Amino acid sequence: MYAFRFLSFLLLNFAVSDAAQGVNITLSDQTLLRTNLAEARLITELDDYAIVAGRSCVDCDENTSIYLHKIPRPGNGVNGEQGDPQSADRYTYPGKYVDYESKQLVEKTRMFYGLCYEGQPSLLWLSEYRDGDGWVKAEYLILVGDDGLKHRYNENRQPSIFYIEDTKCVELPGITAETEP
């Protein structure tokens, strides 16, 4: 079964360090965000979070993914001036995914970021994945608020699709890729 995965894209500033150390990203306020990611690039910043695309390895079968890094700021609970590169969650990058063996299309995912749910900062994935001979629609929503991240998952429905028409809700262009082995 191809479970719901998540990731993203939109290139801003980034500074490359030793690949074994990961890529460091320069944020809008010139803060340096350390990552343990190869090929990392900043998609956007939502409140206290940097949305980053990257991979955790070089020359491997891992797909580019979306990672959420809490931005280190005084009083927000992130240790060190540059943040903790280990503290990022991994999500599916938008696009069409084919099975690496059969080459059959198994997942179609769209990702949005910005004010994508009732005017709140959020990340939204609208996916369809193959289940036997049919397709299952799913929605994964992350609301970004003062008290952290709130996660919502809906299977067989996509109620937040009505909010993606907001001009402050931006779709990240998808890729075509194979599933990971």
Image (cartoon, grey):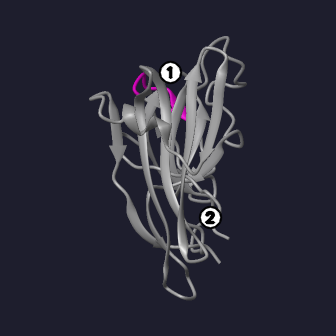
29 inside magenta stretch = yes
Quadrant housing the N terminus: bottom right
x and y percentages locating residue 55 in the rendered image: 56, 59
Q: CA distance from mark 2 to mark 1?
A: 28 Å
What is the number of the mark on residue 162? none
x and y percentages locating residue 109 in the rendered image: 46, 57
- In the rendered image, which quarter is residue 12 located in? top left
Q: Is residue 11 visible?
A: no
Quadrant housing the C terminus: bottom right
* Depicted 47 relative to depicted 24: above or below: above
* Residue at horizontal 48 percent and vertical 37 percent from the top: 159
Q: Secondary structure at mark 1?
A: loop
| Residue 40 falls left or right of residue 11 | right
Q: Secondary structure at mark 2?
A: loop
What is the number of the mark on residue 47? 1
Between marks 2 and 1 in the image, the one whose residue lies nearer the viewer: 1
Magenta stretch: give its range: 28-33
Disc 2 target residue: 57
Q: Earlier in the sequence, mark 2 or mark 1?
A: 1
x and y percentages locating residue 53 in the rendered image: 49, 50
